Amino acid sequence: MTSPTTTSPTADLSPALSPTLPIVEMFHSIQGEGAWAGTNAFFIRLAGCDVGCPWCDTKLSWNPKRHPQREIGELVAAAQAVHPQIVVITGGEPLMHDLTALTQQLKAAGLQVHLETSGAHPFSGTFDWVTLSPKRFKPPHPSAYPQASELKVVVADEADLAWAEQQAARVAPTVEKRLQPEWETAKSQLMVFDYVLKNPQWRVSLQTHKFLGVQ
């Protein structure tokens, strides 16, 4: 384990092996979720996702052909320029791409590298922290579970709570476990609150950047 618009999903995309990657956006903000909430962070959002969560708030990222290819060196330079505490690689589903070269170059530049992933594709890259957020729509590849630093399950209904327990059984006991209410589902906040009170091995994860009104 490592330490601390809308289009239809495209199912036939192969991993990117070139020195470029399709980029939806890059931005400097705070990490809004999970164990590192509130941390100065530079985000690299990769295009491409075939998981297809109906409540996804970044559906514009699903089709990589809609977004420009950018050189890895350019991504690293952009991250270095803002002196973040962490660099977060997110998506889309970032593991649709081979992340080896990107993470190697970011770490060579002295940056701490985090990953946000559903784990739906084989694991690649070297990270300081991995947030595994498994989805029922496309379960994680077995290689993702040993890499998890924290497990974050988005909860929209009761079935997601059962799914969360199934996933918790597949990660190491030391992995931090969080339940995150689905932003557009009003009942999910109370559902998660009540569940955590009865199951103290879980914590509540909130999308604090949305409460703050920042990206």
Image: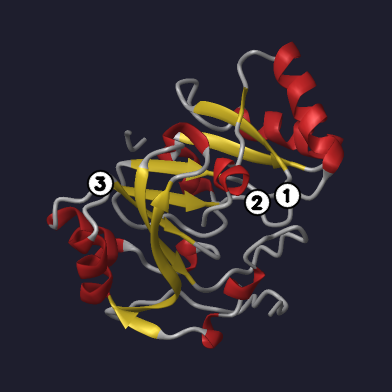
The answer to which quarter of the image holds residue 199 is top right
User: Do the residues under discs 3 and 2 have CB atoms within 8 angstroms?
Assistant: no
Q: Does residue 48 lie above or below 90 as drawn?
A: below
Q: Which residue is mark 3?
A: 112
Per the model, the C-alpha gap separating discs 3 and 1 is 30 Å
- Mark seen at residue 139: 2
- Which residue is more in the foreground, 29 or 46? 29
Q: Is residue 157 visible?
A: no
**Mark 3 vs mark 2: which is more N-terminal?**
3
Whether residue 77 sits left or right of residue 70 in the image: it is left
Task: Assess disc 2: are there few (<14), some (14-19) or many (≥20) residues with their C-alpha within 10 Å of its C-alpha.
Answer: some
Mark 3 against mark 1, which lies toward the viewer?
A: 3
Query: On the image, numbered disc 1 is attached to which residue?
Result: 136
- Figure disc tally: 3
In this image, 20 relative to 24: left or right? left
| Residue lying at 49% horizontally and 77% vertically, measured from the top left | 14
Q: Position of residue 177 (x, y in %)?
A: 56, 27
Mark in front: 3 vs 2: 3
Q: Residue at x 41, y 53 (%)?
A: 29
Q: Quadrant of residue 78?
A: bottom left
In whole angstroms, how far apart are the C-alphas of marks 1 and 2?
Answer: 6 Å
Q: Residue at x 37, y 67 (%)?
A: 98
Which image quadrant: the N terminus? Answer: top left
Q: Hey, which quadrant is residue 4 in on the image?
A: top left
Q: Secondary structure at mark 1?
A: loop
Q: x%, y% of residue 127?
A: 31, 47
Q: Are marks 1 and 2 in contact (CB under 8 Å)?
A: yes
Q: Where is residue 12 drawn, in percent x and y?
A: 60, 79
Q: Secondary structure at mark 3?
A: loop
